Amino acid sequence: MNPDEIEIRRLKVSTHIGVPDEERAEAQDLWISVWMQPSQDFTGLRDDVSNTVDYHRVSIELAELASARPRHLIETLATDIAEHLISTHPLSSVEVKGEKRILPNT
């Protein structure tokens, strides 16, 4: 892990997602991981949460974003998450990973 990176790993969110209508009919659990690089490096934080990214707030936002509307593709949700985080938090980069347990034996 980069020393100037904040990671949220495998946050469970509920969303309506899938290509067939039947798959989107019921909410499904997905697991979202994000790696966020703050614009401010850690040495300048001065032990003050207002100088960094509040990862608790981010976790709430991710859950709200996931449940806000149905989507066909997990890739669309990942893009929505990245765009939201970059536009609303002081971040220089974001990486998003989504896990969906729909295939047998996965």
Image (spheres, rainbow, N blue to C red):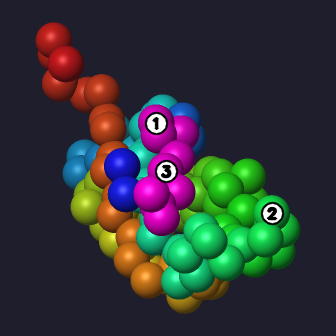
Q: Residue 10, labelled with which disc?
A: 1
Image quarter of residue 42: bottom right
User: Residue 13 at x, y = what percent?
Assistant: 55, 41
Is residue 75 magenta-colored? no
State which quarter of the image contains the C terminus: top left
Disc 3: which residue: 7
**Which of pointers 2 and 3 lies earlier in the amino acid sequence?**
3
Closest to the observer, 61 or 29: 61
Amino acid marked by disc 1 = Arg
* Pointers 3 and 1 in contact (C-beta within 8 Å): no
Closest to the camera, between mark 3 and mark 1, is 3
Numbered marks: total? 3
Cα gap from disc 1 to disc 2, whole angstroms: 26 Å
In the figure, is residue 28 to the left or right of 45? left
Q: Which residues are magenta?
A: 3-11
Closest to the camera, between mark 2 and mark 3, is 2
